[in-house]
């Protein structure tokens, strides 16, 4: 009997896009990453089509089912995408256009939700009754799973915690400005707690860090400005997680994105979150991901292999 054809999962990120091929046991057997064309839509479509063609050629197969994790949200009626981190996709009928190019069974999900789905199945949240996957990368957002199933909601927005608002008094406490967000709102959590938010805070304090890695390196070297930036970031992130706990009460929170690699977060966050909760509320475990900081591609493959999970 022939082996089942692997399922493909594609994770479209703000800086990179990744395709993985998974076998029947959802083990990744092949993967490839490319830079995401952010500004030119035809180049984006061509890049995804080429990524799939390369996978077919190198594996010697034609995968008939592909899961695709798209950044942002899709309007229910028009099918048009809104993506703050990949501007080329905003206003485009991405699902329709990719279907026309790839000519296979496509299953679409949100990139953040696919990360959560992956960690709920064989990942760091496997066996928990509910989980929230919180990505802290180019942007910030997440996905919510109950008994292993994604909770999408009426608009497919469940888990878009990155576009909740930071309270004005918290911004004032830290002397931070009210920032516009690519989603069209102002003061979104994403602008402050994402990896780019860490660098923004350090620059606002008078520094010049280009990204979170630079801030962390400066703090590790004893730079007081960088340490202050990380302290402010931790307080803002803790407040947003406290609101998340009050709203959804997940049994575990799995971190993703580049900041999930910053080990002190796992030691420092629980106490910081507790300061924003009333007595008697216990902070759930906060754990690193099992499938890496960007596991959305495997989650997208799960959508293709087991579409009933969404």
Image (spheres, grey):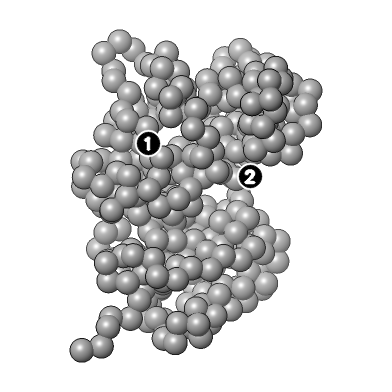
- Asked if 135 appears above or below 44 in the picture, the reply is above
- The quarter holding residue 60 reads bottom left
Between residue 128 and residue 303, name the one nearer to us: 128
The percent coordinates of residue 245 (x first, y second) are 34, 28
In the structure shown, which secondary structural element does the residue marked by tag 2 occupy?
Answer: loop
Residue at image point 52% right, 20% down: 235
Residue 182, labelled with which disc? 2
Residue at image point 45% right, 67% down: 20
The percent coordinates of residue 228 (x first, y second) are 65, 18
- The quarter holding residue 180 reads top right
Between residue 151 and residue 126, name the one nearer to us: 126
- Asked if 148 appears above or below 172 in the picture, the reply is below
Between residue 57 and residue 66, name the one nearer to us: 57
The percent coordinates of residue 261 (x first, y second) are 51, 40
* Residue 159 seen: no
Name the residue tied to disc 1.
287
Q: Residues within 10 Å of mark 2 (few under 14, many from 20)?
A: some
Quadrant, the C terminus:
bottom left
Please count the marks in the image: 2
Quadrant, the N terminus:
bottom left
Residue at image point 48% right, 52% down: 294
Q: CA distance from mark 1 to mark 2?
A: 29 Å
In the structure shown, which secondary structural element does the residue marked by tag 1 occupy?
Answer: strand
- Asked if 31 appears above or below 179 in the picture, the reply is below
The reply, left or right, for residue 118 in relation to residue 96 is left
- The quarter holding residue 254 reads top left
* Residue 28 seen: yes
N-terminal of the pair, mark 1 or mark 2, is 2
Residue at image point 63% right, 69% down: 44
The percent coordinates of residue 102 (x first, y second) are 49, 81
């Amino acid at each position: 009997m022939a082996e089942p054809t692997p399922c493909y999962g594609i994770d479209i990120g703000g800086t990179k896009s990744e395709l993985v091929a998974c076998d029947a046991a959802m083990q990744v057997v092949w993967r490839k990453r490319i830079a995401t064309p952010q500004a030119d839509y035809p180049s984006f479509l061509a890049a995804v089509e080429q990524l799939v063609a390369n996978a077919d050629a190198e594996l010697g197969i034609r995968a008939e089912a592909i899961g695709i994790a798209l950044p942002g949200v899709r309007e229910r009626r028009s099918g048009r995408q809104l993506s703050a981190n990949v501007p080329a996709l905003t206003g485009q009928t991405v699902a329709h256009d990719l279907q026309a190019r790839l000519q296979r069974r496509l299953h679409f999900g949100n990139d953040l939700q696919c990360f959560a789905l992956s960690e709920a199945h064989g990942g760091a949240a496997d066996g928990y009754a509910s989980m929230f996957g919180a990505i802290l990368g180019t942007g910030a957002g997440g996905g919510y799973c109950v008994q292993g199933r994604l909770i999408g909601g009426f608009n497919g927005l469940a888990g878009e915690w990155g576009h909740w608002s930071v309270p004005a008094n918290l911004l004032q406490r830290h002397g931070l400005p009210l920032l516009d967000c690519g989603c069209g709102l102002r003061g979104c959590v994403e602008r402050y707690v994402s990896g780019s938010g860490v660098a923004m805070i350090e620059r606002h304090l008078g520094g010049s860090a280009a990204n979170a890695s630079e801030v962390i390196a400066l703090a590790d070297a004893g730079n007081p400005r960088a340490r202050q930036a990380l302290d402010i970031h931790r307080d803002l992130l803790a407040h947003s997680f406290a609101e998340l706990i009050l709203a959804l009460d997940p049994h575990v929170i799995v971190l993703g994105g580049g900041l999930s690699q910053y080990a002190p977060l796992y030691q420092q966050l629980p106490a910081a979150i507790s300061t924003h909760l009333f007595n008697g509320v216990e902070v759930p475990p906060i754990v690193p991901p099992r499938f890496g900081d960007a596991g959305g591609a495997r989650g997208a493959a799960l959508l293709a292999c087991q579409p009933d999970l969404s």
